Structure formats: structure tokens, C-alpha cells
Amino acid sequence: MTKKKPILYFICTGNSCRSQMAEGFGKKYANGELEVYSAGVEAHGLNPRAVEAMKEVGVDISNHTSDIIDPEILNNAAYAITLCGDAEERCPYSPPHVKRIHWPLHDPAKATGTEEEIMAVFREVRDKIDQLVYDVIEEAKKSAKEE
């Protein structure tokens, strides 16, 4: 019997920026050892600036879709990671085996200013997500090996 791969579920309000970037990095670092998904409390569509910011670091999320939380994925996840306060408050209950983590990240979609200033905010958030995702993927891989 093959053991199911641990699931990481990245959740934010609209599944348009932060959770999409996290899913992109998650798939890059998981190397097929984990299942990685993202979703939102609502579905706002994929933010083109998030796609552009990720493209700059060689991660293509252009084919991602903006999805609402799937209770089956949530209930079977090893980790449910919220990336904003709204999602943390509104994310449905999950069983005790699901490790809940919260990363209170600024919403780059709310950035104002010139295009360059807005993209600078997207890059800053992207780089924070990159490090956080790398660390949680390493933790998840280690946990999966210990089971």
C-alpha cells in the first residue's frame, strides 16, 4: 500500500496573490514529495502582477486558477497555512491532525503608487513567501520521513 503524500494548503482571502505565490514556491520546493494547493475564502482571479513577480524568479504560476476552499483538501491536509488575517478568521474548522500556521503578510494587491512602487511591494512579499514556504516544506518533508 502506498502512503499518501502530505498535503500543504495555502489559504488567503481571494486566492489571487499571496496563496498563489506560496503554491508556486511550494510546488518548486516539494519536488513531488508533497501535494501543494492554494485556495481562498473567495475566488478573485489570478493577479497579473503576482504572475509577473513569480516569473522574475523563474516560477510560472500563469496556469493557476483562483479557487475557493475545498473542504476535502482542507480536512486531509497535513498543513493549512493562512496568509492573511481575514483568511485566518474565516477559514473553516479543520480536524485536529491539520497543523494550522498563520503568516500575517501584507496584501500586495492593495499597494499604491507608480507601477514600479507597486511591483516593489509584490517582490518584497514574494521574497518573504519564498523563505517561509521553503522552511515549511523542509519541515513537512522531515515530518513525513519520521512517520
Image (cartoon, rainbow, N blue to C red):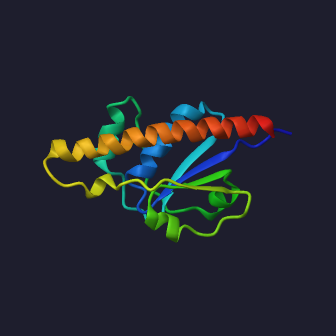
Towards the viewer: 46 or 109 = 109
Q: Position of residue 138 (x, y in %)?
A: 62, 35
| Residue 85: x %, y % from top left | 45, 64
Q: Position of residue 109 (x, y in %)?
A: 29, 55
Query: Residue 94 is drawn in which quadrant?
Result: bottom right
Residue found 43% across the figure and 56% down from its top: 15
- On screen, residue 109 versus residue 65, left or right, reads left
Q: Residue at x 29, y 47 (%)?
A: 48
Indicate the quadrant containing the N terminus: top left, top right, bottom left or bottom right: top right
Quadrant location of residue 139?
top right
Q: Quadrant of the C terminus?
A: top right
Residue in the image at 49% along x and 44% along y: 23
- Asked if 66 appears above or below 31 in the picture, the reply is below
User: What is the total number of numbered labels drawn onto the structure image?
Assistant: 0
Asked if one can make out residue 107 in the rendered structure from this viewpoint, the answer is: yes
Q: Which residue occupies the extreme right position in the image? A: 1
Determine whether, in the image, residue 47 is placed left or right of residue 86. Answer: left
Q: Position of residue 20 (x, y in %)?
A: 44, 48
Visible in this render: residue 41? no
Residue 105 lies, with reference to residue 30, above or below; the image says below
Which residue is drawn at the image coordinates 74% and 39% (left, top)?
Answer: 144
